[in-house]
Image: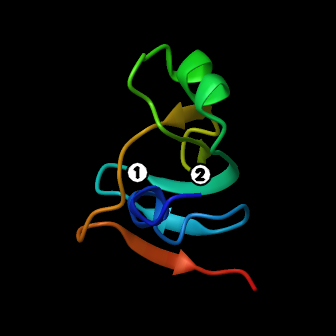
Amino acid sequence: MAADITAEIGPRTPGVVYYDGPALVEVLAVVTDLAEARRVLRRKAARFAVLVRDLHAGTEHYTGAIWTGTDRVLKAVA
Protein backbone atom coordinates (compact mmCIF):
# COMPACT_ATOMS: atom_id res chain seq x y z
CA MET A 1 0.00 0.00 0.00
CA ALA A 2 1.35 3.42 -0.92
CA ALA A 3 2.48 5.71 1.89
CA ASP A 4 0.06 8.46 0.88
CA ILE A 5 -2.90 6.06 1.08
CA THR A 6 -1.68 4.82 4.46
CA ALA A 7 -1.57 8.43 5.68
CA GLU A 8 -5.09 9.09 4.36
CA ILE A 9 -6.45 6.00 6.16
CA GLY A 10 -4.59 6.96 9.34
CA PRO A 11 -4.87 4.74 12.41
CA ARG A 12 -8.14 3.19 11.26
CA THR A 13 -7.84 -0.57 11.58
CA PRO A 14 -10.55 -3.08 12.50
CA GLY A 15 -11.59 -2.60 16.12
CA VAL A 16 -10.50 1.03 16.46
CA VAL A 17 -13.15 3.38 17.84
CA TYR A 18 -12.85 7.01 16.83
CA TYR A 19 -14.77 10.27 16.83
CA ASP A 20 -14.91 11.94 13.42
CA GLY A 21 -16.82 15.06 14.38
CA PRO A 22 -20.45 14.16 13.87
CA ALA A 23 -20.26 10.52 15.00
CA LEU A 24 -18.60 7.97 17.25
CA VAL A 25 -17.70 5.01 15.04
CA GLU A 26 -15.99 1.64 15.19
CA VAL A 27 -13.92 0.43 12.24
CA LEU A 28 -15.14 -2.92 10.96
CA ALA A 29 -12.96 -3.27 7.83
CA VAL A 30 -10.54 -1.37 5.64
CA VAL A 31 -10.68 -1.96 1.88
CA THR A 32 -7.50 -1.08 -0.03
CA ASP A 33 -8.28 -2.93 -3.25
CA LEU A 34 -9.00 -0.14 -5.76
CA ALA A 35 -11.75 -1.97 -7.65
CA GLU A 36 -13.57 -2.98 -4.46
CA ALA A 37 -13.22 0.48 -2.88
CA ARG A 38 -14.61 2.09 -6.03
CA ARG A 39 -17.47 -0.41 -6.14
CA VAL A 40 -18.60 0.01 -2.52
CA LEU A 41 -18.28 3.80 -2.56
CA ARG A 42 -19.61 4.13 -6.12
CA ARG A 43 -16.84 6.64 -6.91
CA LYS A 44 -14.40 6.26 -9.79
CA ALA A 45 -11.64 8.06 -7.89
CA ALA A 46 -11.85 6.08 -4.62
CA ARG A 47 -8.51 4.73 -3.42
CA PHE A 48 -9.73 3.04 -0.23
CA ALA A 49 -12.91 2.52 1.77
CA VAL A 50 -13.43 2.10 5.51
CA LEU A 51 -16.47 0.20 6.77
CA VAL A 52 -17.63 1.74 10.05
CA ARG A 53 -20.46 1.21 12.53
CA ASP A 54 -22.04 4.31 14.05
CA LEU A 55 -22.08 3.40 17.75
CA HIS A 56 -25.06 5.62 18.55
CA ALA A 57 -27.34 4.66 15.66
CA GLY A 58 -26.05 1.12 15.18
CA THR A 59 -25.86 1.58 11.41
CA GLU A 60 -22.99 0.55 9.17
CA HIS A 61 -21.64 2.42 6.16
CA TYR A 62 -18.52 2.85 4.06
CA THR A 63 -16.55 6.06 4.08
CA GLY A 64 -13.76 7.28 1.85
CA ALA A 65 -13.01 10.29 4.03
CA ILE A 66 -9.34 10.89 4.76
CA TRP A 67 -8.02 10.98 8.32
CA THR A 68 -7.85 14.59 9.51
CA GLY A 69 -6.54 16.48 12.50
CA THR A 70 -10.03 16.70 13.96
CA ASP A 71 -10.51 12.89 14.05
CA ARG A 72 -9.74 11.38 17.47
CA VAL A 73 -9.00 7.75 18.36
CA LEU A 74 -10.85 6.82 21.54
CA LYS A 75 -10.03 3.10 21.61
CA ALA A 76 -7.01 1.63 19.88
CA VAL A 77 -6.33 -2.05 19.32
CA ALA A 78 -3.02 -3.87 19.24
Q: CA distance from mark 2 to mark 1?
A: 8 Å
Give the residue pinned by disc 1: 23
Under mark 1, the amino acid is Ala
Q: Residues within 10 Å of mark 1 (few under 14, many from 20)?
A: few
48, above or below 42, in the image: below
- Give the total number of marks visible in the rendering: 2
| Earlier sequence position, callout 2 versus callout 1 | 1
Q: Which mark is residue 55?
A: 2
Instruction: Determine the image quadrant of residue 19.
Output: bottom left
Residue 41 relative to residue 43: left or right: right
Could you tell me residue 5's position as x and y percent?
45, 55
Splitting the image into 4 quarters, where does residue 59 fall?
Answer: top right
State the residue lying farthest toward the left: 69
* Other-residue count near label 2 (Cα within 10 Å), few / some / many at <14 / 14–19 / ≥20: some
Amino acid type of the residue tagged 2 in the rendering: Leu
Is the image coloured rainbow, by chain, by secondary structure, or in one colour? rainbow
Name which residue lies at 59% across and 32% down. 34
Q: Secondary structure at mark 1?
A: loop
Q: Indicate the quadrant where residue 15 lies.
A: bottom right
In which quadrant is the C terminus drawn? bottom right
* Residue ID at (56%, 64%): 12
Residue 55 on image: x %, y %: 59, 51
For this rendering, which residue is in front, 75 or 44?
44
Residue furthest to the bottom: 78
Tell me if 47 is positioned left or right of 59 in this view.
Answer: left
Q: Assign a secondary structure to mark 2.
A: loop
Labelled pair 2, 1 in contact (Cβ < 8 Å): yes
